[in-house]
Image: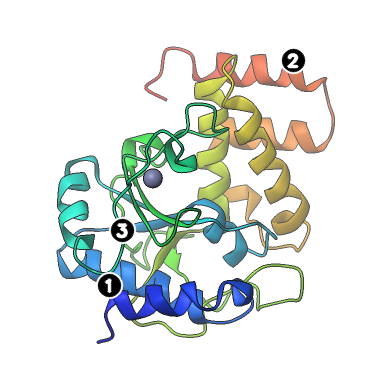
Amino acid sequence: MMSALFEADSLRSNQHLLNTTIIDEKLVASISGLLNRSKIPCVLWGNYLLTIHGVPSIVDSIDFIVPDGNIAASVLALQNQGLGSCTEPKSCTAIAERRPSPPPAAHFHIDSDFTVSIYKQSSALWFLPNLKLSSKSSSPPNIILASDSQLPPPRLGRGHGKFQNSTPQVYIPSAHCLLEAYIRLLARTHGHRYEFFWMAMITYIEEYVDGDGLLDEASLEARCRAFYSALKACEKPVALLLEDLEASFAGTEN
Ligand SMILES: [Zn+2]
């Protein structure tokens, strides 16, 4: 198996090719493979994930979510694999205080601007019982392979699309699972500065994924579905929809 070091070097020398070749796909798969080799379940997150679902996004980090108890093990698994540690935390954009979304629990550098970040499951996918590939009996699945045939193909200006290769395996949230996460995160952060970020993500899903007919809206959790359908129908001003959403989760563990 090729080392992550080789892949990181490839990426550094091919920055202009990012999002247009499978070089970055190989890097993502290599990181997933390193985590899986240490028996750490991991699911892709962040902007790279958006590009697989056909949302055009600027990718400056490859992000994975792991169970909360596996953060230290993830750092160990990725150490000494050609990724750099953070040498300038004061100027690092990955953990800048003013970044628009929550910072990762740990991160490595491919270069000063491109990172590999690890997030806790409790920060985004806490509502899932585990991060494993959904069994065929649970329909439709929350977690799928990045090479799933139902994902969009690569399209010019529309992101990476589905993976062309399936090894090492990379797991991702399905479109409805991703939207549910964004809506739950919006409900969690209503009234705080992160709410604008999650609202933007929901808008991207509506415009690109739902717009492509690739969202299984009926599979959304009931409160999330009520919010999303009202948002699409412009039933009320967004501020009132947000109040309704927050109220629908009040008193629950969201
Ligand atoms: Zn850093």
Tell me, yes or no, if residue 147 can be seen here.
no
Q: Quadrant of ligand 1?
A: top left
- In the image, which disc is placed on residue 84? 3
- In the image, which disc is placed on residue 210? none
Q: Label 2 sits on what residue type?
A: Leu
SS class, disc 2: helix
SS class, disc 3: loop
Dot 3, how many residues are within 10 Å of its Cα: few (below 14), some (14-19), or many (20+)? some
The x and y percentages for residue 191 are 60, 14
At x 20%, y 58%, the residue is 40
SS class, disc 1: helix
Q: Quadrant of residue 20?
A: bottom right
The x and y percentages for residue 62 are 45, 59
Question: In this rendering, would 43 be left or right of 239?
Answer: left
Query: How far apart are the two marked residues, 1 and 2, measured between alpha carbons?
Result: 44 Å
Dot 2, how many residues are within 10 Å of its Cα: few (below 14), some (14-19), or many (20+)? few
Provide the residue designation for mark 2.
240
